Amino acid sequence: MNKQDIDNLIRWSFDVELKRFSEEAYGVTGTAFDEYDDYLRGKFIQMQSNFIMWIASLDSKNRERLANNITKGE
C-alpha cells in the first residue's frame, strides 16, 4: 500500500453513494440491491460513522473487490 492507495480510499469513502458502495464493496447490483437494501444501508451508515469497524468487518472477498474497484482508475 502506498500514499496513492490511501488517497484513493479516502476519496472513494468521501464521494461514494449507496448504490456504488453496494456494487464496489459488496458486489450487489441490479434487482439484488432491493433485496439487501436495509443491510446495505446499515453498512453504508457504518462506513460513514465508523470506517475502521466497517472495513475490518469485510471478508477477504469483499476486501479484494473493494481494493480492485478503488484502484482500477489508476
Image (spheres, grey):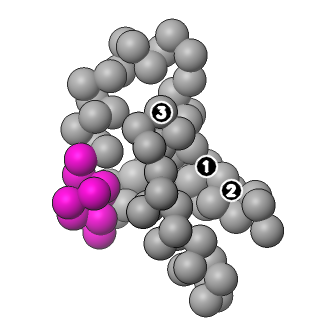
Mark 1 neighbour density, 10 Å: few (under 14) some (14–19) many (20 or more): some
Observer able to see residue 40 = yes
Residues under labels 2 and 1: Cα distance?
A: 5 Å
Residue 74 to residue 37: above or below: below
The kind of residue on which mark 1 rests is Arg
Residue 34 to residue 41: above or below: above
The kind of residue on which mark 3 rests is Lys
Residue name at image x 53 percent, y 39 percent: 20
In the picture, residue 6 is in which quadrant?
Answer: bottom right
Which residue bears the numbered disc 2? 68
Element at label 2: helix
Q: Nearer the viewer, mark 3 or mark 2?
A: 3
The kind of residue on which mark 2 rests is Asn
Element at label 3: helix
Residue name at image x 65 percent, y 83 percent: 4
Residue name at image x 59 percent, y 71 percent: 8
The percent position of residue 11, horizontal first and vertical second, equals 52, 68
Which residue bears the numbered disc 1? 65
Which residue bears the numbered disc 3? 19
Q: Is residue 47 left or right of residue 5?
A: left
Q: Nearer the viewer, mark 1 or mark 3?
A: 3
Residue 10 to residue 45: above or below: below
Magenta region's main secondary structure?
helix
**What span is in magenta?**
45-54
Going from N to C along the chain, the mark reached first, 3 or 2, is 3
Observer able to see residue 64 = no
Residues under labels 1 and 3: Cα distance?
A: 15 Å
